[in-house]
Amino acid sequence: MQDLTKLIRCDSDDLPENLLGLAIRLENPGKNNPHSAIFIRYNSQNYLFHFTGNGQKVYLTTAINNDWFLFKALTNVNFFIPSIFAHFRRIKTKSKPAYFYFYGGGLFDSNGDYVDNEGLPNYMTCVGFCLAALKQTLSTDLLKFDEWPSGKIKGKPEDFVELFYKKKVAPNYPDISLELFSKNVRRISPLEYITAGFSDSFPASKTFVETSKQRIKESILHSINTWEYND
Amino acid sequence: MANNFEIRIVKDSSKNEAKLHAMSLEVAKSFLVLVEAVTKIVENTPNNENLTINITEGSVKLLVEGDGVEQLQEDFLNVVKGSTDKVLVDSWRRMQTLFKNNGLEYEAIISTSIKKTRVYDILKENKALRAKPTKRQIPKTNIEFIEGVLIDVGGKNPNIHVEIAGNKRLKINCTEQNAIKARKYLYEKIYLSTWLNKRNGKKEYDFCDSYVVKEDSPFFKYKNFIYQFENAEDELDSLDLVYDECLNLLKLKKYNSLKRFLKLFMYHNTDVNTLHTIKLLTNYFKNNEELKDYAWQFETLFDNKIKNLNKIAKF
């Protein structure tokens, strides 16, 4: 049986019958960008639940060997994986997220609707999607998202957020000001997301993630180098 | 590098080459079976929006191409190992029957950057593919619906006695309030929901709710619901049934009906997944004056359930 305290490949089979975890797709130059997903093993089948910017679609698919996904198990929810899987299945059918570097603490409720206390729109990255989908399942935030810097996205032009706001947000959500929108523009990376899974309690703090992510990155790199395809 | 699933009908049963522009009847028939099976397989492959199905010359050739072939390959290997996906298994089996039985010459290979999978050889060598039966882990409820004549009420440990069909008598544990309310119906026919337990090897009933039976009574509605719940295709469907019923009553603002429905599950022996499914909805209850007690009660039930399961797991 795999050691559930460590990073595990998503195509592993020597696992408990039901399991939930945070998954990351390793960078595979020319093929895969880093990506995040929720790993769920239900009835001895492994699935990945995730949202991609490319095509803006939500997937709930079986995990396969050549996709280079690793996960960290969250073992405190093992008793009710079937209910979580049914919940994800409903989110998959009903939710319609759109892609942007944005997360303000919303969640997908069990109807698949996006619920946010401030009425913020459901713009999100792959990580934002996982955070929103997990929030109700864990009954808490996975990480203290508001400790991540907001307003600007590193490596993007100065007016990147404002342009997006004017083009996409303002016409559809006239009640949301640029200020409120910018306050929740942030980027949490797939590496930071999976690092939070190693915290002893949730929500994980930014300090915990910052101090641990190098160590996690090294184990990920180790996995890339030793990754083998099984036939 | 090739990334496709290629199936060819090479020769007919008289060893003549099969040609797309001049198919004999037996080739055309096999071709139809293949097209149908492949279409079904692609339809049931996740991320199939980039997959195309091409029919080309080169004997009679069917080609599935695009991103997603790897998923198709993985799913095929799973089907051979023993999958529970009935639709997929059926499609592959139809292809297998064709390869095994009808005497034409075929080729079928899935090629991806990772590996080549000799579909034809694998299907030909394996015995007929069968879908593994899904474990029917349907959450069992211990809810029992009882109709009968109330023949006795009271006692130090309050209970009611009901005579049901076949002159059988059942004793149902209840609260004092339940007993006081029930007394009014002495010697009348009553309709109850109960939770059945086995304590020390003996069947015991705990009172859940009582119903006035007229047309459209919740008694029959719930009885039918619990039947559907326990006989759903799989546990996910039965959980969806509970979820949909709650949400539907919420949307219609039928709070009293919702409370009565929820009462059926408000019990320490209710399955943890059913409790969790209801708990996912309690966000909606919290801001509702009529329902907020129920949010609290279900959260407590759920938390206690998890505590107990953890205790059992530690042994």
Image: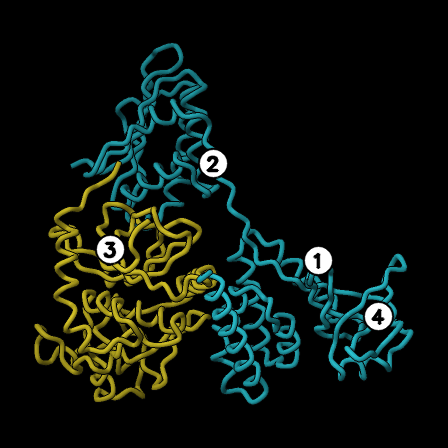
Chain colours: A yellow, B cyan
Q: Chain of mark 3?
A: A
Asked if both marks, 2 and 3, belong to the same chain, the answer given is: no
Label 1 sits on residue: B201
Residue occupying image coordinates x 40% and y 73%: A136
Q: Earlier in the sequence, mark 2 or mark 4?
A: 2
Q: Please identify the quarter of the rendering in which residue B183 is found.
A: bottom right
Left or right placement of residue A230 versus residue A151 in this view: right
**Residue A73 visible in the snapshot:** yes
Q: Amino acid at mark 1?
A: Gly
Figure check: A41 above or below B183: above
Residue occupying image coordinates x 35% and y 69%: A134
Q: How many marks?
A: 4
Q: Chain of mark 1?
A: B
Q: Earlier in the sequence, mark 1 or mark 4?
A: 4
Q: Which mark is residue B161?
A: 4
Q: Between tags 2 and 4, which lies in front? A: 4
Q: Amino acid at mark 2?
A: Asp
Q: Amino acid at mark 3?
A: Leu
Which secondary structure lies at badge 4?
A: strand
Figure check: B256 above or below B82: below
Q: CB of mark 3 within 8 Å of CB of mark 4?
A: no
Label 3 sits on residue: A70
